[in-house]
Amino acid sequence: MSQKLLYILCAVFLTTACGQKQPQAANAQEEVASTTAPPQPKQPAPSPKPAPTEGNLRGRVSGMSGNVSNLNFEITLNADVMFDFDKSDIKQEAFPILADAVNTLKEKKASLISITGHTDAKGTDAYNDRLSLQRAESVKQWFLANGLPIAIETKGAGSKEPIAENTKADGSDNPAGRAKNRRVLIKILKVESL
């Protein structure tokens, strides 16, 4: 076996073992195949449906992201996109985002979901708890009125479950962190049985 052929086979093996495709290795593999065996007709690669990932959901509509881990599936709706400041009425511009969330939940065959509203730390706990629950209820009512007749639990977490710091290390306001905390989280709790 020539040194070049050995090099090519090692490159192909390493590329395959690492799960990466490199154009040079693929071309080298075709070169080896053409010198050692008659050409084989190329089979079209199957095009699998991509599994839902955060990236897939973000690409669909801005204002909505998703997280898939093991059997858990979550959709996060940006409250700044969904609601006006200090309000729980859903903005009309948020309807396409909610419609996309409905379609995603139908694709996942959700039969029970939870919707949890979250706020930043501005205001009292009592006020934030009430506002976050009202926002979760608004999303629930929109889902039910727009083609998602499933069991839905709602909860208002207020500012108790932040995903970012509301203030900076020096104690000053952190608007970017507060914006991340203002959200509505949807979790699939149960799916239809087959």
Image: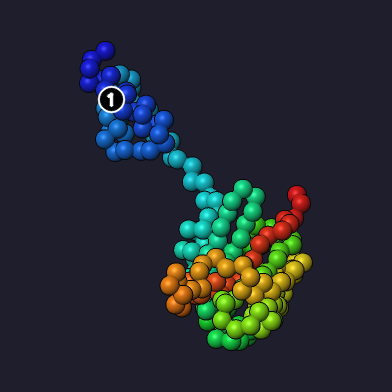
Residue 128: quadrant of the picture = bottom right
- Badge 1 is on which residue? 8
- Left of 188 or right of it: where is 11? left
Q: Of residues 46 and 87, which is closer to you in this image?
A: 87
Q: Is residue 71 above or below residue 128?
A: above
Task: Give me the residue at 75% from left, 49% from top.
Answer: 194
Q: Is residue 34 above or below residue 67?
A: above
Q: Position of residue 22 (x, y in %)?
A: 31, 38
Q: Quadrant of the N terminus?
A: top left
Q: Position of residue 75 (x, y in %)?
A: 59, 64
Task: Give me the residue at 68% from left, 60% from top.
Answer: 188
Q: Position of residue 134 (x, y in %)?
A: 69, 81
Label 1: which secondary element? helix
Q: Is residue 34 visible?
A: no
Task: Give me the residue at 63% from left, 83% from top.
Answer: 124
Q: Of residues 16 and 76, which is closer to you in this image?
A: 76
In the picture as drawn, the residue positioned furthest to the front comes out as 170
Q: Position of residue 9 (x, y in %)?
A: 32, 23
Task: Give me the residue at 74% from left, 61% from top.
Answer: 111
Residue 24: quadrant of the picture = top left
